Amino acid sequence: MQEISLSDNYALYDVTPIENLFLLEFMPYAPGDAVKVYLYGLAVCRYPDKDLSIKGVSRALEIPEENVVEALRYWERKGLMMGVSDNPPTFQYMNVRSAMIESAKEENPAYKLHEYNERLQSMFGILHAQQFRLAAEWVEELNLPQDVVLYMCEKTNELLTLRNGGKPRSTGYIFKVLKDKAVDWANRGVNTMEMAINEMEKELPPNKLAKTVIDKLGMKRRNASVPEIALCAKWLGEWGLDEETIIKALDETTKATNPSFGYLDGILSGMRSRTEQENAAYPEVKAVLEALGAASRTPTIDIIRSYIDYIDKGFAHETILRAAAKCNSHNQHSFRKLEDVLEKWMKLGLTTPEAVNAYLQKRESLRSTTLEVFERAGVNRSASDADIDQVGQWLNIASLDLIIYAASCAKGMSLPMRYIEKRLGEWKAAGVATVDSAMAYTSVKPATKSLFHQFDHRETDDGYYDGLFVDLNDASGKDG
């Protein structure tokens, strides 16, 4: 029986020694999960009763089990851990100083591809063991130089990202493509940097675009010439056109007897003025989206063109910004809502900041008046645009004092706004224009004929009602 043991919370308040060599030489370059797994494992392995299984570490650090295993494999490649078994994966911590000494030995075969693996890892992050083994085969079995393989990896990664709309592909997919490409290059003897650059240039956007243009123009199957590739590079780079725009412009070449790259260049040159206008409007549209509360949204070509259209209709940029801010204040962040406001303002002739300011000041004053009407009528809610419009209409037919008096009369009514509308209509029809006359008009009730006068009545003489009651003063108690 163990008579002396550590308390349950001993591990929590204990300290774990970490070598400075690890902090300075290994930790700055390690992935986040790898650092967490290393430090947590180092702390917990000092207490045998703690769960240091893959599943236990995964649960404690709240990261997937496969990430734990990859982190341990990472430190194994660094020499800070040693694999003991594969099923289940079991590792031992190694002394940091000893690992650094071993890694410095050039004759150590474990570090023959150390720098090569480091370069791969800097490109793709944490790699699986089989991916490191595959990359090693390209060098050791296919006899491809390391610099050629690294260039192939870098440019293939960039190319696949471009083809995927700018979104990085998964490491597994990239290595699947690289595997086939490495075998192809080895079979064709692509084993120098010059040859590797030539191979990758064939797949780069200008080269690919040139081939597409040749096919679309119906030219005989051939490779693109250097000037043709240079034109494609200009369209994509200097002019900033995307491939979709260029391919769409090819439709215009059907008007030519002998369509060519030069003819297409002329068409795209004619389109540049519109593209430059749209590019010039980009920062202004971005500012509008920020005022709209949609700063994270990228301006689409449709939004940019809509903005330019409103500018052409006479709207100042500051006016559009003001409309966007108004939408944002009402928690409306779509460009469609902004267009609705601009259409309304255009009908009101509000295209300049001065006109908008005057309109909004008048509107704000009308809002205050509406809230005063609400208060007098006992309405407990915010004023909508419809309410403000209604009060504005009342001011066209009655004075503010008369409206306030009507609101006071409406207090306690189930539909106070409807009551005010009705009273103001009656008063206008009766020529009532002041509060005093409204009070007098309200107090005078039109005479109505009583129901008593709507029927014929029986003629009676003086003694007709004598038999309808008992005279309590009569001592005999008989009817009188």
Image: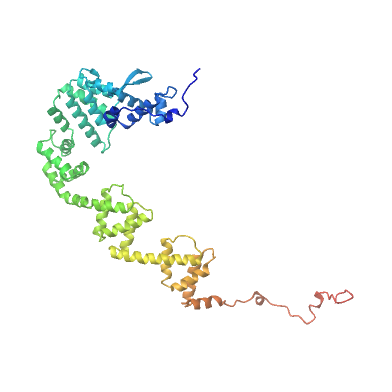
Observer able to see residue 17: yes
Front residue of this view, candidates 374 and 248: 374
User: Relative to residue 262, is residue 454 drawn left or right?
Assistant: right
Q: Is residue 426 above or below residue 105?
A: below
The residue sitting at 12% across, 33% down in the picture is: 223
User: Relative to residue 427, is residue 219 drawn left or right?
Assistant: left
Q: State which quarter of the image contains the C terminus.
A: bottom right
Farthest-out residue, bottom: 462
Q: Is residue 430 above or below residue 344?
A: below
The image position of residue 391, as x and y in percent, is 43, 67
The residue sitting at 74% across, 80% down in the picture is: 459
Q: Is residue 393 above or below residue 169?
A: below
Observer able to see residue 339: no
The image position of residue 81, as x and y in percent, is 32, 22
The residue sitting at 52% across, 76% down in the picture is: 439
Farthest-out residue, front: 4
User: Relative to residue 471, is residue 49 drawn left or right?
Assistant: left
Q: Indicate the colouring scheme.
A: rainbow
The residue sitting at 80% across, 81% down in the picture is: 463
The image position of residue 347, as x and y in percent, is 32, 63
User: Relative to residue 3, is residue 69 drawn left or right?
Assistant: left
Q: Tell me the quarter of the picture where residue 397 sits.
A: bottom left
Q: Is residue 287 above or below residue 371?
A: above
Q: Tell me the quarter of the picture where residue 291 sits.
A: bottom left
- What is the tally of numbered marks visible in this picture? 0
Q: Tell me the quarter of the picture where residue 328 sits.
A: bottom left
The image position of residue 157, as x and y in percent, is 23, 32
Front residue of this view, candidates 307 and 262: 307
Front residue of this view, candidates 187 and 478: 187
Farthest-out residue, right: 476
